[in-house]
Amino acid sequence: MQRGDIVYYMQPNVRKPDLVAAFLGWPDAAQVSTSAVSYLIDKLPAVKLAEVKSDDYYDFTKIRPTINIEKGIISPLNVPRNGLYYWKNSEGDNDLIFLTGIEPQVHWQLYAEMIADLAGFYKVRRAYFIGGLYDRIPHTRETRISGLVNDRGMLEVLKKFNVEPIDYSGPSSIHGLLMNMFAHRRIPAVSLWGHIPFYIRSENNPMVCLEMVKKLASILGVSIDLHELKRSAHKLYQELNKMLTENEQMNDFLKSLETQYDLEGSSFGTEVEGDDQIIKDIEYFLKRKRQDS
């Protein structure tokens, strides 16, 4: 069944759901947000509800569809997808709807209206938009998760779950438009951001992802098996510590960053001389470790 740009596979009876969304791309440093939401979808587990048609929201010359060809036979084309999932809460009155996909490249207004219409159709109670950003924060300090809301009353949610209200002025992700669109529809919304140490530019960061999943599970009131994430996070932490013991320059860099962070706090979006080389050296070390293991 199709309604506008959304193709539905089923129409479940969803009760007072919360919407949780994450978008690959600019608002997803180290894939913290999409990894966190995908982990929740997998572990609850949630069921595929629908899919957003991609034709109107992506430039296929920049995000190219992929194909697989075996012995001269082509398989179906894989195009950028946005998937919708739902989870029935057997222990409470509030179900969950998940949206995970790629931040649209064009027609943001139409996309935001489509998601807001979806939220209105299912009578979404609250929306949570998950993001990840690079920050001048050492991995040896407590993971920082900051947030913003589209309604002053929702500040109590940030306070209750120890989410730091964020100050920021600059370019916006799709979160900004969705937050404003939901405010116009009178749907309370929260945007949560995991802060990733800027010098760890691996494909994903399970250390920050773990803390984001824990925070989301607490806010949403759900129980999640964290064993896999804890194991991956511990492995990355051990790799970083090994690097520090083997490389005096890296150890000095981290001590300097710890001192700066403890005195001044974080400063996401800023870079200093030498950052590029530090990032390259750590990327090389982690890549080598994974090839050897």
Image (cartoon, rainbow, N blue to C red):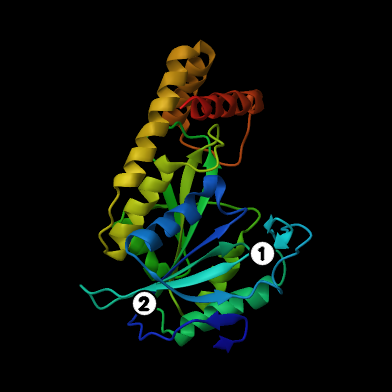
Query: Which quarter of the figure is the N terminus placed in?
Result: bottom right
The percent position of residue 105, horizontal first and vertical second, equals 70, 63
Q: Quadrant of residue 76?
A: bottom right
Circle nearer the N terminus (1, 2): 2
Assign a secondary structure to mark 1.
loop
Q: Amino acid at mark 2?
A: Pro
The answer, for residue 185, to whether it is visible in the render is no
Q: Is residue 224 above or below residue 154?
A: above
Q: Quadrant of residue 245?
A: top left
Label of residue 17 in the image: 2
User: How many other residues sit within 10 Å of disc 1, few (<14), some (14-19) or many (≥20)?
Assistant: few
Q: Amino acid at mark 1?
A: Ser
Q: Is residue 271 above or below residue 112?
A: above
Q: Is residue 128 above or below residue 206?
A: below
Label of residue 75 in the image: 1
| Nearer to me, 38 or 252 | 38
Q: Residue at x 47, y 41 (%)?
A: 205
The answer, for residue 224, to whether it is visible in the render is yes
Assign a secondary structure to mark 2.
loop
